[in-house]
Image (cartoon, grey):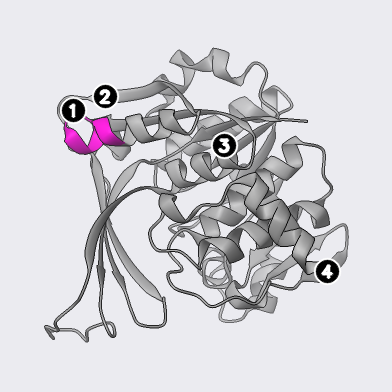
Amino acid sequence: MNGNIIVVGSLNMDLVVNAPRHPQIGETILGGRFATFPGGKGANQAVAAARMGAHVRMIGCVGEDGFGAELCKVAAQDGIDTSHISVEKAEATGIALITVDAEGRNTIVVASGANLSLSPWHLHTAKAAFSDADVLVTQLESPLETVSEAIALAAQQGIRVVLNPAPAQPLGAEILSKVDYFIPNEREAMQIAGTDTLEAAIEKLLALGVRNLIITLGEQGALLVAGGQRTHIPAYPVKAVDTVAAGDAFVGAFATGLAEGLGLEAAARLGNAAAALSVTRPGAQPSLPLRREVDEFLGDKK
């Protein structure tokens, strides 16, 4: 069963340099390999879902430049409906400057560019795209006003909402109460809740109306908090080469599982498997696995 997913979010070109370690403030170090990769959390999650077998439509903005044209071309090659991606003539396509150290850990600085032009108007222009969607996936690299409107439109039509709150910013009950599946990592959960511990963050987020809280824990897997219960879904051990887009791989695969009718735990395991495969490969979108690869990987783990 292939589900229908609509992704509202960002498209960036990732400019990635490998280095032995991350530099300190004021320090210059010599790096190694440099490459450009299609990225942006929205586009990454759209590609992740498409490669997992979902039918995906994307709503977003790019600039009228080479990066924007390439991002749309690559998304279309993965079968994503790009007809609702707007070209903003007055803005540059978003970019992300990424440094990856010898352990595969990354730091990222984003220049949002055209992504900040994504407005509620774009959503209403593309309102027909919501008509048969099973799941909405969105993040916080787009203006909060637009993310909030997308969530409201989905809630009105009974579409399940997955929110990956990255980069983290304060969120209130008016948004969180409309989200069906809230997927921060540990640091994002504490930042959004304004707490110093994960336990306090969980309690605060539940009090703000979060119904299904999925906290991604990197090499520790994921913690599910739902229905008054907590379930730890262990990660699959692999040798990490590059952790860029691991969270996006999880979100895209998780949303696909939901759209296909999987339960919370089964969808999280699917997400963990996709994330595990993604960290064994460099780059953002190039690292995202196909469904047959994930199925084979899971088959080997039985």
Local SS, label 3? helix
Amino acid found under the numbered disc labelled 3: Ala
Residue under the point 66% across and 39% down? 161
Residues at marks 2 and 1, CA–CA distance in whole angstroms? 6 Å
Residues at marks 2 and 4, CA–CA distance in whole angstroms? 43 Å
Specify which label sits upstream in the sequence, 3 or 1: 3
Query: Which of the 4 image quarters holds residue 42?
Result: top left
For the residue pair 152 and 59, the one nearer the viewer reads as: 59
Residue labelled with disc 3: 50
Residue labelled with disc 4: 230
| Quadrant of image for the N terminus | top right
Does the residue at mark 2 contact the one at mark 1 (Cβ under 8 Å)?
Answer: yes
Q: Which mark is residue 87?
A: 2
Amino acid found under the numbered disc labelled 2: Val
Vertically, is 219 above or below 145? Answer: below
Residue under the point 52% across and 72% down? 187
The segment highlighted magenta reads 63-70
Amino acid found under the numbered disc labelled 1: Glu
Residues at marks 3 and 1, CA–CA distance in whole angstroms? 25 Å
Specify which label sits upstream in the sequence, 2 or 1: 1
Q: Is residue 213 visible?
A: no
Mark nearer the viewer, 2 or 4? 2
Left or right? Give the position of 18 relative to 104.
Answer: left
Mark nearer the viewer, 3 or 4? 3
Local SS, label 4? strand
Residue under the point 44% across and 34% down? 146
Residue labelled with disc 1: 64
Q: Main secondary structure of the magenta part?
A: helix
For the residue pair 299 and 145, the one nearer the viewer reads as: 299
